[in-house]
């Protein structure tokens, strides 16, 4: 059975809204829905440019529409995911707000699909606390009268110009067999590499194939690698702060060529090696954290070598080799 | 080339700054595109197709800019193409647009590239942890710093060479009102005393983070004849790529870059780039990449790039000015940076570069972009005379 590991990529993006979308978002905090005039049309939600001609639309031509409107088309969402606007079954609908020429896509909360039909009249249910986001409307509900959910904290104090956009995506990654073998061996502090049967190059890092000969490297090609190697190149990073950055002080990332191997381990952390003493040719040995079961994405190789946490000075004399510095990948 | 003669007939760009909170992404690209249309004396309806490019999606979290930006770029009812080659994308986007005209498919193509770095953090975008890989927590500078160290050791270049480039490009930027960094007091000492960001790179050896967009209108011979101003004729275009990592790869002097240069020089009749070009706009996001690319692009023998830099050959008043606009070191809206290089050389041969106009002798100039782990290259040669065929 193929094993999978999950990893999530999450980032709080910012959006600058510009004059038209900014005015629309500001309007939402005031419980007003704004469209923009383009000829004899009123486009809702407003656009900065006419979608047909590309002509610039005038932010002074923004007009209030709704608050009620008519359902033009809809689809039922029987099992909402956590990314949907409501936690219970609802409809996504095209709603033509009164005074608008184009429909707005939003959620309609009717409890059951048989309560909804094309032509149904709906009105917004506003969030009590509004920030200038399309989610300031929780959903549309049957009827002509808008509602406010909970105490009304009023409009935004200043015009809305920015919006948070918290993006996240989760991947399920299949784990190649070679990485499972590496990980299991790492529990006994063994570092497994593979020798290509054709060219005899020895690969570290769990590659699973020889890119020179285009052959797969299976269990029979596994070899135990020594725990010592040489720093071929490095960088000292002064960290910039961003969400998820845990480093605060300058730190080293080194490329390690394990003895008897042909490819480096890239971007490895160092242990008990001050940044001022990192240099090309420095000899290092593997450093391990105490073992435990939770090693999927830990360590110096994202879990491939388990609790290998980095490289510690071995105390041996430096290697003098002018070509070493070129071993970057 | 067996292709239709093709020219840049309009150029526009934003003033590059660290954060444009006053416009949406759409508003940003629109500014550059409108300026290019105005320059070409055209309106939105005159454009046959739109080709856009931006850097990797994680940099802004916009996954389908071609969808989101269709109305902002007047693309309704027209072909719209998105190009995607990491940091070189601005160059390859312009080349795709040019090919649509060279092939005789379209008369006038609008091409736009942009980045709004203030919406995210590019170092984060380049450092996303993946299972079973060593996490690259270092960003682009951390990636390129070891390669630069290898160049320094290989060439025997003195350690201040990179700093000379940092000063030179920032002094050039003072002539360019659209450049982000204007550092009138910069000198060697300021660079040497700036924070060590990614050894051996110091803060001032590194490009800034920018919001900006670049646009060009590329037209046929007929469209060029109808243009209100001078045009920049395209004498050659080339793109090459190679894998980021393979055994024996020369990271410092990549084969793909050498091959790309040889291809575009052959098309444009360039035999001695140092003499045959009046200037070059080359993608130098980290100062040391000037001497490295001088060698990769054949402006000198391998190992001699730093000597040209040190001798001032690439300075504004040198014999072969590199990045008279101030270059990537002075403005870096990543997705646009390659197209800015391509557009700035077009402006040079049109004699539209303002205070950073170089004297024209041959009337030819080289635009260059690279991206990824030095694995994508795109280049074009433009000139002030019509190509022969
Ligand atoms: Zn092999």
Image (tube, rainbow, N blue to C red):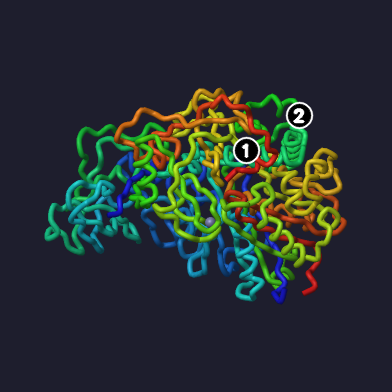
Is the residue marked 1 within 8 Å of ligand 1, measured from its CB?
no
- Quarter of the rendering containing residue A277: top right
Residue B145's tag is 1
Q: Quadrant of the N terminus of chain A?
A: bottom left
Left or right: B299 in relation to B143: right
Q: Which residue is identified by label 2?
A: B187
Q: Which numbered disc, 1 or 2, marks the residue that appears first in the sequence?
A: 1
The residue positioned 77% from the left and 56% from the top of the image is B365
> What's the chain of the residue with tag 2?
B
Disc 1/disc 2 C-alpha distance (Å):
22 Å
> What's the chain of the residue with tag 1?
B
Task: In this rendered view, identify the residue nearer to me: B170 or A112.
Answer: B170
- Quarter of the rendering containing residue B362: bottom right
The verdict on a common chain for dots 1 and 2 is: yes
Left or right: A38 in relation to B242: left
How many marks overall? 2
The residue positioned 52% from the left and 34% from the top of the image is A228
x and y percentages locating residue B52 in the rendered image: 55, 59
x and y percentages locating residue A147 in the rendered image: 20, 43
Task: In this rendered view, identify the residue nearer to me: B291 or B195.
Answer: B291
Image height check: is B264 above or below A234? below
């Amino acid at each position: 059975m193929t094993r999978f590991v999950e990893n999530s990529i999450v980032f709080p993006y910012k959006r600058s809204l510009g004059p038209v979308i900014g005015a629309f978002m500001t309007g939402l905090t005031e419980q007003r829905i704004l469209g923009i005039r383009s000829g004899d049309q009123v486009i809702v939600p407003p656009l900065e440019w006419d979608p047909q001609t590309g002509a610039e639309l005038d932010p002074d031509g923004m007009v209030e529409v709704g608050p009620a409107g008519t359902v033009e088309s809809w689809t039922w969402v029987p099992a909402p995911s956590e990314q949907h606007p409501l936690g219970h079954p609802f409809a996504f609908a095209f709603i033509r707000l009164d005074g608008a020429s184009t429909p707005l896509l939003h959620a309609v909360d009717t409890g059951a699909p048989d309560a909804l039909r094309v032509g149904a009249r709906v009105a917004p249910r506003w969030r009590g606390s509004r920030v200038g986001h399309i989610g300031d409307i929780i959903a549309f509900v049957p009827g002509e009268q808008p509602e406010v959910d909970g105490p009304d904290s009023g409009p935004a104090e200043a015009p809305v110009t920015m919006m948070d956009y918290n993006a996240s995506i989760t991947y399920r990654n299949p784990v190649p067999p070679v990485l499972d073998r590496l990980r299991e061996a790492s529990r006994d502090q063994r570092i497994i590499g593979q020798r290509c049967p054709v060219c005899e190059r020895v690969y570290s890092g769990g590659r699973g194939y020889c890119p020179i000969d285009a052959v797969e490297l299976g269990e029979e090609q596994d070899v135990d690698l020594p725990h010592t190697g040489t720093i071929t190149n490095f960088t000292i990073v002064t960290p910039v702060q961003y969400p998820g950055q845990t480093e605060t002080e300058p730190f080293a990332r080194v490329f390690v060529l394990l003895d008897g191997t042909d490819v480096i381990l890239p971007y490895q952390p160092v242990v008990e090696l001050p940044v001022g003493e990192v240099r090309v040719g420095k000899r290092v040995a593997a450093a391990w954290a105490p073992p435990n079961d939770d090693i999927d994405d830990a360590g110096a190789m994202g879990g491939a070598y388990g609790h290998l946490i980095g490289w510690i000075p071995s105390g041996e004399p430096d290697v003098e080799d002018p070509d070493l510095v070129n071993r970057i990948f | 080339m067996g292709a239709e003669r093709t020219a840049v007939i309009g150029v526009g760009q934003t003033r590059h700054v660290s954060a444009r909170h006053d416009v949406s992404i759409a508003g940003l690209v629109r500014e550059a595109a409108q300026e290019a249309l105005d320059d070409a004396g055209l309106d939105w309806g005159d454009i046959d197709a739109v080709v856009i490019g931006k850097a990797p999606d994680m940099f802004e979290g916009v996954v389908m800019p071609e969808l989101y930006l269709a109305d902002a770029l007047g693309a309704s009812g027209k072909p719209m193409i998105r190009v995607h080659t990491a940091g070189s994308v601005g160059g390859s986007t312009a080349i795709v647009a040019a090919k649509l005209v060279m092939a005789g498919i379209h008369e006038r193509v609008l091409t736009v590239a942009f980045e709004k770095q203030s919406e995210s953090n590019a170092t984060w975008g380049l450092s996303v942890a993946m299972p079973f890989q060593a996490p690259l927590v270092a960003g682009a500078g951390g990636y390129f710093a070891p390669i630069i160290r290898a160049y320094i050791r290989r060439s025997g270049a003195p350690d201040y060479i990179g700093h000379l480039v940092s000063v030179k490009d920032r002094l050039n930027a003072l002539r360019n009102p659209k450049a982000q960094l204007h550092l009138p007091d910069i000198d060697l000492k300021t660079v040497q005393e700036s924070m060590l960001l990614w050894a051996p790179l110091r803060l001032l050896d590194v490009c800034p983070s920018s919001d900006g967009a670049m646009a060009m209108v590329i037209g046929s011979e007929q469209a060029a004849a109808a243009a209100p101003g001078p045009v920049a004729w395209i004498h050659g275009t080339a793109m090459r790529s190679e894998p980021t990592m393979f055994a024996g790869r020369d990271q410092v002097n990549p084969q793909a870059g050498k091959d790309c240069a040889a291809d575009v020089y052959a098309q444009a009749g360039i035999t001695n780039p140092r003499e045959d070009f009046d200037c070059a706009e080359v993608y130098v996001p980290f100062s040391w990449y000037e001497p490295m690319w001088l060698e990769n692009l054949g402006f000198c023998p391998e190992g001699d790039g730093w000597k040209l830099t040190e001798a001032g050959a690439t300075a504004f008043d040198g014999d072969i000015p590199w990045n008279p606009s101030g270059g990537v070191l002075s403005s870096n809206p990543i997705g646009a940076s390659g197209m800015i290089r391509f557009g700035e050389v077009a402006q040079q041969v049109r004699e539209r570069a303002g205070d950073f106009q170089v004297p024209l002798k041959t009337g030819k100039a080289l635009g260059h972009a690279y991206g990824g782990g030095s694995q994508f290259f795109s280049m074009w040669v433009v000139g002030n005379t019509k190509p022969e065929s």
